Amino acid sequence: MTPRLIKITIALLFCGVIILSGCAAQSTELSFEAMDTFMRVKLFSDNGESASLKIRAETERLDALLSTADKSSAVRALNEDGSLQNGEVADLTRRTLELCGSTGGALDISVYPLVEEWGFISRDYKIPSRERIASLLEGVDYRSVKAEGELVTLRPGMKIDFGAVAKGYLADRLSAVLDEEKTASALLNLGGTVYARGKKPDGSRWTVGIADPENSADFMGSLECEDRVVATSGSYERFFTGSDGRLYCHIIDPKTGYPVDNGVKSVTVVCESGLKSDALSTALFVMGKEKAAEYYKRNGGFEYILLTDKTAYVSDGLIGDFNLARTASYEIEAIR
Ligand code: AMP
Ligand code: MG
């Protein structure tokens, strides 16, 4: 290279740095409460302010649409009236019913009356009688929920809820908001469901912590990811100790009507679709470790980490992206 060429190259490089730093997206952070949890969002965007406003508005809109606790929500109206005309709810119902079907009913949105009966909505926890559980179970069957065009209909007495998929669906909707706002880099922690969009501004991938079920304020490990939704279902998230001294968690096995008690402590599912990650984290939790592995091998299209007391079952595609925390004492078993 001639001295002149070197000078030109240095000048161009210098220019490049200035242009790049001039383009560096600004960081915007916001945190708020919604969907009965605490959400934290970090955006790297020149449109941070308008993106933040739209994120809040979209989250509040979905909360008001889907929350069963909100007396004026669309889903509440559906449960009270047995039918609802609403294109978005009908579409979400159709897509969720497909996942109920593919998981053999491990995910079942019509299990809601049991979630209520055990006190997970009112927080007035109790162990229902066997008779009461058996009678409520008779009404549980996602195949009786119909979504045709914009109309959703339920069998008399049936109630549904989207608690198992709402945050994942929200992640998908917020992805569309960030497309509109031309925001390529963001980390959205929607309370147990994390959407890692693009890469960090320095070009590296996002690091998403996996909560340690023994102490959910700590991480047992972390995942490196990019353009993925990481959804976790854990028994530690909501549970109570019954009068019999046993722990009862908020995820109900639709086959028995009882809270899941199969040794699984948490399941994290990673895939591009938020709806699917959230649906499958709940479903694999219900299935337990053997059936979850079978489901993964048969269907694919996602990756997962299932934690029991001592072992972290990590699916093939995540082995290279998962790092066990130094303080954690899990054995790692690969699922291939
Ligand atoms: P997640 O935290 O995503 O696993 O969702 C758990 C929530 O989904 C619970 O709080 C219930 O509202 C609801 N739920 C519990 N068990 C099931 C199930 N087997 N299928 C569908 N929804 C469920
Ligand atoms: Mg879920």
Image: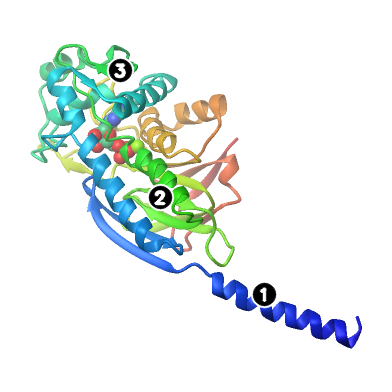
Lower sequence index among marks 2 and 3: 3
Q: Position of residue 306 (x, y in %)?
A: 44, 41
Q: Is residue 214 visible?
A: no
Q: What residue does disc 1 label?
A: 16
The colour scheme used here is rainbow
Label 3: state its secondary structure.
helix
The residue nearer to you, when weighing 140 against 274, is: 274
Q: What residue does disc 2 label?
A: 194
Q: Residue furthest right?
A: 2
Q: Amino acid at mark 1?
A: Gly
Lower sequence index among marks 1 and 2: 1
The residue nearer to you, when weighing 130 against 229, is: 229
Q: Nearer the viewer, mark 1 or mark 2?
A: 1
Which class describes the residues within 10 Å of circle 3: few (<14), some (14-19), or many (20+)? Answer: many
Q: Position of residue 233 (x, y in %)?
A: 35, 41
Q: Which label was assigned to residue 205?
A: none
Q: What residue does disc 3 label?
A: 142
Which class describes the residues within 10 Å of circle 1: few (<14), some (14-19), or many (20+)? Answer: few
The quadrant where residue 35 appears? top left
Q: Amino acid at mark 2?
A: Val
Label 2: state its secondary structure.
strand
Which class describes the residues within 10 Å of circle 2: few (<14), some (14-19), or many (20+)? Answer: many
Q: CA distance from mark 1 to mark 2?
A: 34 Å
- Location of residue 110 with respect to 212 vertically, above or below: above
Look at 36% across and 20% down and name the residue there.
Answer: 105
Look at 8% across and 39% down and name the residue there.
Answer: 124
- Location of residue 220 with respect to 64 vertically, above or below: below
Q: CA distance from mark 1 to mark 3?
A: 57 Å
Q: Position of residue 181 (x, y in %)?
A: 44, 53
Label 1: state its secondary structure.
helix
